[in-house]
Structure formats: structure tokens, C-alpha cells
Amino acid sequence: MSSHDVLTKARHLLSGKKKWCSGVIAQFVDATKNVPCDPQYLYATQWCAMGALRKYDWHDETSAMETLRKVCHEKHGYSIMSANDLLGWEVILDCLDAAIVVALQNETPVLGHHSE
């Protein structure tokens, strides 16, 4: 899956605030309390930005992760986790949107450029 695909899926996953969380990478509701869990856990219902990326691509050092790291740092001076936990859901959506644009630009070949 391309970094653009991973970022787009993560953005779609977090498009509703009820699917987003802070303080943990992912969680599910057990009776009346939220329980932290693996982002790929079948019954997970909420994810932070990092958890949403890991749901679709488990590796830490992917181009999707790196692209979002750069965007969060350039726009806000924070890591992904800090931006998620300190700045909130709307900021994370904005960062994901910007990261999607960057990923798409990085994956689109430049017209007239020929590789040898």
C-alpha cells in the first residue's frame, strides 16, 4: 500500500471525532470504560493519529509515518503523538490532509522527466 493510501485510509478512519482518541494509541469500549488495545485489534473503536496509521501499516518507519511526522513538525513544532494529544482532533485532521497532499506529490511522476 502506498503512503498516500495509508494516509488517506487513516484520515477517513478519523473523519468522525468519535473514532479519535488521545493518550493511547487505540482503544475499545468494554461495558462502560475505554480499554487500550492494539490498533489492529478487531474490536478497536478509537485511534489516535499514530494508531490510525498503524492500523493500515504496522511499521514505524514507513513513508506515510515520516510524511506525517514532517508535516506535524513543520506546521506545529510537535511530534505526531504530541500534536494528537496536545492540539487535538481538528489539528490532526489538518495535518493528515497536508500529509496526503505531500504524499501524492511525492508519488506523482514529474512530466518531461526521464529516468535513465
Image (tube, rainbow, N blue to C red):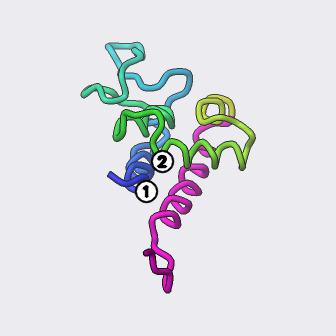
Three-letter amino acid code of the residue under disc 2: Ser
Query: Residue 46 at what x, y percent from top left?
Result: 41, 30
**Magenta highlight: main SS:** helix
Q: Secondary structure at mark 1?
A: helix
Q: Is residue 55 above or below residue 28?
A: below
Crowding near pointer 2: few (<14 within 10 Å), some, many (20+)? some
Query: Residue 28 at what x, y percent from top left?
Result: 36, 22
Three-letter amino acid code of the residue under disc 1: His
Q: Residue at x 60, y 36 (%)?
A: 80
Indicate yes or no whether the magenta region holds residue 59. no
The image quarter containing residue 54 is: top left
Q: Residue at x 38, y 13 (%)?
A: 32
Q: Secondary structure at mark 2?
A: helix
Q: Badge 2 is on which residue?
A: 63
From the viewer's perspective, is 75 left or right of 54? Answer: right
Q: Badge 1 is on which residue?
A: 4
Measured in 3D between alpha carbons, the distance from the residue under mark 1 to the one under mark 2, in whole angstroms, is 9 Å
Crowding near pointer 1: few (<14 within 10 Å), some, many (20+)? many
Image: magenta residue range:
87-116
Outermost residue on the bottom side: it is: 112
Q: Residue at x 45, y 36 (%)?
A: 18
Query: Residue 40 at what x, y percent from top left?
Result: 31, 29
Q: Nearer the viewer, residue 59 or 43?
A: 59
Quadrant showing the C terminus: bottom left
Label whose residue precedes the other's in the sequence (1 or 2): 1
Q: Residue at x 55, y 56 (%)?
A: 97
Q: Nearer the viewer, residue 42 or 68?
A: 68
Outermost residue on the left side: it is: 42
